[in-house]
Image (spheres, rainbow, N blue to C red):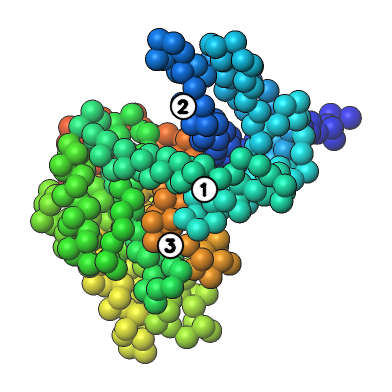
Amino acid sequence: MDKNNVFELTSAGHSTDPLTEILRTGARHLIQVAVQSEFQEFLAQYQDRRLDTGRAAVVRNGHHPEREIQTGIGPVTIQVPKVRAKDGTAVVFRSALVPPYIRKSQSLEAALPWLYLKGISSGEMQSALQALLGPKAAGLSAGTVARLKQAWAEEYEQFRQAKLDLDQWVYIWADGIYSGLRGEDDKLCVLVVIGVNAQGKKHFLAIEDGVRESKQSWREVLLGLTARGMNAPQLAVGDGAMGFWAALEEVFPTTREQRCWMHKTGNVLNALPKASQPKAKQALHDIWQAETKKDAEKAFDLFVKTYEDKYPKATNCLHKDREELMAFYDFPAKHWQSIRTTNPIESTFGTIRHRTKRSKGCLSRQGMLHMMYKLGMCAQENWRRLRGFEYLAKVIVGVKFCDGEEVTESSKNHNQIAA
């Protein structure tokens, strides 16, 4: 028999699941920062211990060899710093978070996924760290927690000031992410911008606290990007929030606009009765899944003609952004899957929305902002390059595309004959 029914199984310690890799990376970084903060707290106890020359008697002395701790999400590599006493009196640093010889811990297995999402919360950092070792954990002083929180804040501020002029940014995706906050009626609105450079690599460009999705808030975000050296992108993808588009027109007037089909589909269907939604949804898909702009226009007109008499609100919602919904047809076809929606942002922050819904707004404003930043940075490490990235150079220099294909002299002549 030619059919093979034998399948190779991956080991639990080497899962290729993207979410597991994100959790593992975040857990390793969090534990490493926590151990470093714990070590600094340990050294502070000996700051008055000096040699005759006045120099510190207890100093850092490299690291112990790396070792793996088996957890519920696979192996996490940890490296613990060493200490040396120059005055002859032995001093040994033993981490309470990662005790010597530990290779596997049930408390660690249970804590890591939760710790990753809870670890940068302003009010719950200490309880998160204690989950690693249980109620008898030592070394988790207020000073250690303060160092950890400061490390997250400094990392976020460095991200906000990083220069953007070393890359040519071709496309950007923009969206507002809302999450509940502790003790506040208003939700936190985080304004997020993701960009793709000429090499096809996607990066977070901005994760900022905004006032709703107002024009002024988005204007401040975009002006901040220009101050960091960002060029005017060729295309911006976003939902129908008027604040962003009004700000974009002022700051980057040459940038084309592409409305998100996912948001638009949801808005149109909300104006229709539930019984009509399945058929209408398929009719909307026929528009943006058409092979050519001409076919898409026909499907667009058919949708309007079908529903405008009974449901004018739905057709008006669709018709007002007609030109912006069709912009992707003027760009390479291999990019259509990525530039028709704001999915890069939506997929990244889906976990955040789920976590804040379950916690019912337990985080402070800064804690929530830092948590969104850390989740985004870890997710970014696993992003793949944009499909068809080799066409980005042509988009940058202004090569024309029609229905996803490059416009050449031969194609022009063919179109003229067909017309």
Left or right: where 407 falls relative to 113: left
Mark nearer the viewer, 2 or 1: 2
Alpha carbon distance from label 2 to label 1: 18 Å
Packing grade of label 1 (10 A; few <14, some 14-19, many >=20) is few
Residue 75 versus residue 108 in the image, above or below: above
Q: What element carries label 2?
A: loop
Name the residue carrying label 1. 142
The amino acid at mark 2 is Gln
Q: Where is residue 16 in the image (x, y as percent from the top left)?
A: 65, 35
The amino acid at mark 3 is Ser
Q: Earlier in the sequence, mark 3 or mark 2?
A: 2
Q: Where is residue 90 in the image (x, y as percent from the top left)?
A: 64, 16
Q: Can residue 25 be seen in this view?
A: no
Q: Where is residue 289 in the image (x, y as percent from the top left)?
A: 42, 56
Name the residue carrying label 3. 364
Q: Which residue is drawn at 60% across and 51% down?
A: 128
Q: Can residue 44 be seen in this view?
A: yes
Mark nearer the viewer, 3 or 2: 2
Residue 319 versus residue 15 in the image, above or below: below
Q: Position of residue 391 (x, y in %)?
A: 31, 32
Q: Residue at x 33, y 68 (%)?
A: 300
| Picture quadrant of residue 416 | top left
Judge by depth and name the residue closer to the eye, 96 or 379: 96
Name the residue carrying label 2. 47
Residue at the far right: name it.
1
Pointer 2 with pointer 1, Cβ within 8 A: no
Alpha carbon distance from label 3 to label 2: 34 Å
